Image: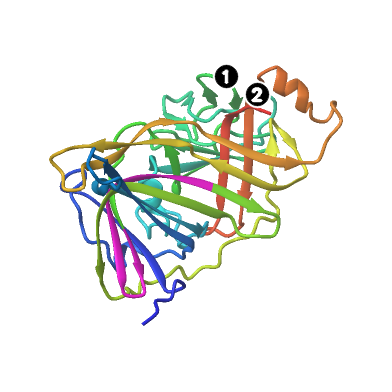
Amino acid sequence: MALLNRKQVVSLLVESTAEGTVVNPGVSGAGFNTFDTTFSPEVEQYERNPFRSSLGRLASIAGVKTATVGFTTELVGSGDHTVGGDPLPFHDLMLACGYEKVGVDALTISAMSGTNFTAGETITEDGGGSGVCALSTKENDTTLYVTAASSIGTAGALSGGTSEAASAAATNVSTDAAVMYKPVSTGTSTYTVALFNDGIRHRVKGCRGNVSFSGSTGQPVRMAFEFTGPFEDTTDETLITPTYPSLVPPSMLGAGLSVHGDLLVVDSFEIATGNELAVRRSANDDAGAISTKITMRSMSGSIDPEVELQATHDFIGKLTGNTEGLLDFTIGGTTGNKFRIQGPNCSYAG
């Protein structure tokens, strides 16, 4: 019987016992739509070509076995924007790519002007409270997003430890207002990733991976994932039937995309995490490897803006001057299905 490639499901599950200890991903780890799915095994071959009376050579021997599972999914919410609520469909996918989930509080403030708060700096209140700025503020922003802001109240003015920005006191503090995913350098768990294909299951253990985001005007934002690890097995197994997201992914409309504080006319964008992955080889493992580790990260991206006058946005001056600034835009407008993407220290590379 011919197998149908359209009948595919990807699932992944955290390896909680020990890194590289294979588990069995099932329906609980597969609640996201997938597009353009690929499975690429990489089996090293030791060639045997001894000197003999025959000109032929002997069959090669299989060695270290790794594999990569790739697919694209959609940037879509779960309807719940709180820390302890329903996780986003791509939550575990992001964790496996070197990100962490952080709870965010929202402070209602007077409209910002001049020097604004910058992501990562400490925000202090005259009354003694403090928190960490989660998202950089822009001109006319009336909300300041911070982490660990339980001690900030509405008594005194707010100031930034790095930017020295200041605003009137917060008029309202909303805790657990959102969640944020940001890259981290330690503490990333490994995952077992399984690709089910109409009766066959490919399983790869000890995985970490990469994610890139891309979008065009009027279309949903796509998230392309690739996970690499030691190849565990391929077996016959019934196709699983997970529960898929019920919400429709928001389109890239009304995004307010700005670079270094300037609104640009942009049709499409791409942002890549750029993780460098290295396989941990081990002769003690049947696959010849334990897991994949992230050894370096090189974030990059691209946009396709219309050319502006230098007085409006000096592309060349910013390129040659190594100018850093904020990339900021929003996807969607409904609470629980709204996303804000920021790069606080972006510079032009070409």
Camera-side residue of 108 and 56: 56
The residue depicted at 15 percent of the width and 38 percent of the height is 283
User: Alpha-carbon neighbours of circle 1 within 10 Å: few (<14), some, or many (≥20)?
Assistant: some
Q: Position of residue 26 (x, y in %)?
A: 28, 66
Residue 330 at least partly seen: yes
Which residue in the rendered view is the most extreme toward the left?
Answer: 284
**Mark identifier at residue 243:** none
Q: Quadrant of the N terminus?
A: bottom left
**In the depicted structure, whether residue 144 falls above or below residue 314:** below
In the figure, is residue 57 to the left or right of 148? left
Q: Position of residue 345 (x, y in %)?
A: 58, 27
Q: Amino acid at mark 2?
A: Thr
Spatial CA span between label 2 and label 1: 8 Å
In the picture of the structure, the residue carrying the numbered disc 2 is: 115
**In the depicted structure, whether residue 172 falls above or below residue 125:** below
Q: Which residues are magenta?
A: 194-212
**Mark identifier at residue 164:** 1
Magenta portion: prevailing SS class: strand
The residue depicted at 46 percent of the width and 63 percent of the height is 34
